[in-house]
Image: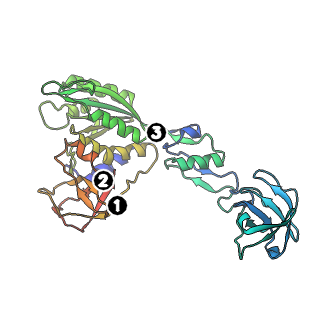
Amino acid sequence: MISFEKALDLILNSARYLGDEPVDFMEAQNRVLAEDVFSDVDMPPFDKAAMDGFACRRADLGSELEVIETLAAGQVPQKTIGEGQCTRIMTGAMVPEGADTVIMVEQTEETGHERIRFTGEKTTPNIAYKAEDVKTGDLMWKKGQPILPSHIAIFAAVGCTSPLVAKQPRVAILSTGDELVEPQQKPGPGMIRNSNAWQLVAQVKSANCIPNYMGIVPDTPEDTEAAITKALAENDVVLLTGGVSMGDFDYVPAAMKKNNVEILFQKVAVKPGRPTVFGTTGNSYIFGLPGNPVSSYINFEVFVKPLLYKLMGHDFKPYELTLPMGVNYKRKKADRLEWLPVDINEQGEVIPVGYHGSAHIHAVCLSKALMKIPVDTFELTKGESVHVRPL
């Protein structure tokens, strides 16, 4: 049995980049950028009015001003501002030459036909200056980072309409077990619905990869081996749930070896999820995850997701918070790192939820985070700082 840290290192050190492809920028959301994106323009591209008002010279604010032109956004000024002159200007319009200030409409009054005066005591320039946000050639977003909705606006602004993005891993999902039926079926005596696979399909989608559900595998060595052979041939990553412990019908590790998989570890000092298997063969990766849904859910988050992002060229760093415990907590054994479903109350304190073990997936649904309890830690006291990973 190896430590959590060692297992994660083995997984990430085995990863290879899957390559890249251009996509339409409106299809790029949540993909991982495969090239640096630079600006081909200044932003703003010219000095522009930050609000509706009158463009003038600050030196003339104490005088009556003649309105010599009206400018809407998109129009180019035809006149230069001279002494005692101003231009009526709309938000976003180009500030005419000679002006160094835009006074707000609310701080002016008409004194005659096309004549105004400033009624305020003071004003800021109210000008968004050329290139104050971005200069031509500035780096807009880095290679290896996920593309968020705000980045779509950036790509549009700099004309990056076909960004190069990392290819998405294709992920096979199989469930082993003669006791399983699909969700559409009513389970008979001794049977249960297959929830693990569909949970993993959703998690793969949330990592912006391509899930490939390949069904329930009967509990025989031959069926398990054949399913793994087919899954490895058609996918980049294979996820199996169940069949990885030491029971009489747990065939996954043996079937992996028959498919020339180099098993890098077979047990990890984590709770839940100790009987987790990981191996590689050729250009493919395979996980044997425990059959209980909390175990498979958590081990996807802490082991599989980092690998998927690494295959796309992104160094995934899970978001963790340090928060105080809201109650005292004890556990009987401390030989493994434990991920415990917890709530976070209005005071920002961590409260363990009712949790009956790794089959109790409803506990995860009721949780806001997973609390990380280190090896050799038996007790956590109210007020003690703990690390939690938001869900």
Q: Where is residue 331 in the image (x, y as percent from the top left)?
A: 14, 57
Residue at image point 75% right, 72% down: 119
Nearer-N-terminus badge (3/1): 3
Residue matched to label 3: 18
SS type, badge 3: loop
Q: Is residue 32 visible to us here?
A: yes
Tell me where residue 16 sits by quadrant: top left
Q: What element does badge 1 sit on?
A: strand
Q: In this view, does 380 lie above or below 193?
A: below
Q: Which residue position is annotated with label 2?
A: 369
Q: Nearer the viewer, residue 375 or 180?
A: 180
Say left or right for 42 vs 377. Answer: right
- Amino acid found under the numbered disc labelled 1: Leu
List x then y, in percent, for residue 164: 57, 41
Q: What residue type is labelled 2?
A: Ala
Q: Which circle, 3 or 1, is nearer the viewer?
A: 1
Number of other residues with Cα within 10 Å of mark 2, as a class: few under 14, some 14 to 19, many 20 or more: many
Residue beneath disc 1 = 321
Q: What residue type is labelled 3?
A: Leu
Residue located 57% across and 46% down the image: 152
381 and 80: which one is in front?
Answer: 80
Can you see residue 14?
A: no
Q: How far apart are marks 2 and 1 (CA)?
A: 10 Å
First in residue order: circle 2 vs circle 1: 1
